[in-house]
Amino acid sequence: MSNSTLVSPALAALTAVCVLLWARRQTDERKVGSIPAVGSSGLLEYYTGGWRFLFHGPEMLAEGCEKYPGRVFRVPRVFRWNFVVSGAALIQDVVTAPEDVLSSVVANRDASALQLDFTMGPELSANMFHIDIVRTKLTRNLGRCFPDIRDEVSCAFDELIASDGTDWKVVTALPMVTKVVARTLNHIFAGLPICRNEEYLDLAMQYTIDVVLRAQLISLLPFFLRPILGPLISSRNQSVRKGLKHLGPIIEYRIEQEKEHGSDWPGKPNDYLSWLLESVDINDERTAADIVSRILAMNMAGIHTTSSVTFFPIITSLFLLMLLYSYINALREEAEQVVEEHGWTKAALNKMYKIDSFLRESQRMHDNGPLSMTRQILDPLGFKFSDGTIVPYGSIVNVTSRGEHFDKANYENPYVFDGYRFYKMREERNGGLFNRHMISTSLDHLAFGHKLHACPGRFLAAMELKTMLAHLVINYDLRAEIEGVRPPDDVFGIDFVPNGRAKIWFRKRCDA
Ligand code: HEM
């Protein structure tokens, strides 16, 4: 066969592909062309922009926020547009829209960086009772769980810092804090001794990394390949198998006790595992694997190593404390005074106003990335925002909180860290209604989301983080690795992670 006979079909095929790509882009532009796009929305950018986003996402989002404040704009992702919502009025539209119109579950299942069905299993997104339990039983029982939280935080820090009382000891902050958070959460999830089992903790921490990294790989695949390659890429089956090795015997024992002595059997632990078991059919042989999946999912929500929701406030606070030494004495004085008066109790934590303010301010200024609150539009007519913008059916929408957190209308000197910002607001209220606690969500403070899907774990998270900070300032002196420098965050795509190499010097307090 001559070269020319081969070239013509190849040229025809290439032309057909170009026409198809052009037609797809034209159809898309007809639907969303009126919504501003970051970068060009020309033919080439339409297909290459998603790859650019993988490496320059934060810059592209910052450009969108600057050019289109208070509006919806779009950024290219691989194979789709991502619609980004800024400004209080439009964010209010997102956080109050019902689940059957703007869905968080569908977004996290199908389109977002979590790929729930592959990474955690379809049973979880089909019935999310494990989240309801966080909202209800876990939150209601926090007072009773507090001694366990306090005990775990104190044992974990003292073991990991292992300072003998006179010498300074240098510790890498991120792995230490990850371990303390994982131990404390798992104390509440499944109790002692499993929360201190190294192999189990490695699984819990590795699972969160696996979910996020593997989900990102799956979401790069075209839709038709996901059901075929998704299960092969996901490590879900291995993780559940490993989880069953550790949690299986505990679950079996508790089921046996319940069968023998009834649901309120003597010695029944008051923890998340018990509350999960109260909500399932204990005679179903799939129960143990299902419970393990849900406990791993809650580790994912609570630890979330890659975007490190829980570490961000505490590590940022520690880095800031070392930059701004004057805060250490004030926070220490407050913590000691309150603990002296009330003991180590939940009531004492509620009185640590400066620590609460310091953590809330560090969340305002340092979040774990420019996008949050992923939603998918389920209404076939699209979603109409209050400014008239219509985003079509099936699109993915995200909120960017930075505009609100740094808006001069919301905060005086918004770019200046003021650890007492919310403490001063509280003082001004002079005992009147105050709703700027660390756990309060509002349109000007979106670290935990707001309204419908606001983080149900925030009450536990706040309790844990305040205990951690108070324990450290009461018991240790702290010093920065490099004086006067806040270690820069690491950036992976659009996820910001506290610097994984930064070190902190600790010494058991000599003057205590
Ligand atoms: C400082 C720590 C934490 C931060 C900053 C944080 C932040 C968030 C944010 C921004 C959301 C998404 C809200 C939305 O989509 O509208 C969320 C959801 C969620 N968080 Fe947290 N979270 C933290 C700790 C925890 C902990 C410790 C748990 C579990 C014990 C937890 C459980 C959840 C769950 C289950 C959801 C999904 C809620 C839903 O879809 O209705 N989080 N969190």
Image (spheres, helix red, strand yellow):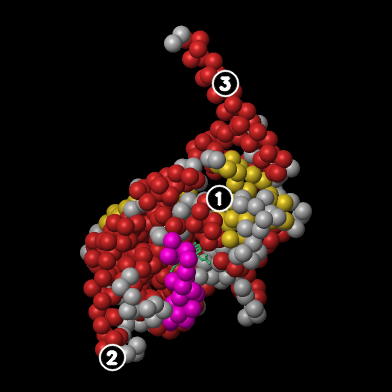
Against 168, is 144 above or below?
A: below
Instruction: State the SS at label 3.
Output: helix
N-terminal of the pair, mark 3 or mark 2, is: 3
Against 475, is 212 above or below?
A: above
**What residue occupies the far right of the structure in this picture?**
388
Which quadrant of the view contains residue 29? top right
Amino acid carrying label 3: it is Ala
Quarter of the image where the C terminus is located: bottom left
Left or right of residue 142: residue 445:
right
The residue under the point 37% across, 78% down is 281
- Which disc, if any, is residue 261? 2
> Residue beneath label 3, please?
12
- Which disc, if any, is residue 110? none
* Label 3 CA crowd tier, 10 Å (few <14, some 14–19, many 20+): few
* Label 1 CA crowd tier, 10 Å (few <14, some 14–19, many 20+): many
128 in the magenta segment: yes
Coordinates of residue 306 in the picture (x, y in percent):
41, 52
* Label 2 CA crowd tier, 10 Å (few <14, some 14–19, many 20+): few
Report the magenta stretch's main SS. Answer: helix
Coordinates of residue 379 in the picture (x, y in percent):
66, 58
Amino acid carrying label 2: it is His
Residue 308 visible, this orientation: no
Of badges 2 and 1, the one in the foreground is 2
Against 20, is 108 above or below?
A: below
N-terminal of the pair, mark 2 or mark 1, is: 2
126 in the magenta segment: yes
Residue 449 visible, this orientation: yes
Report the magenta residues as a range. 122-143
Amino acid carrying label 1: it is Pro
> Residue beneath label 1, please?
370
Coordinates of residue 284 in the picture (x, y in percent):
33, 75
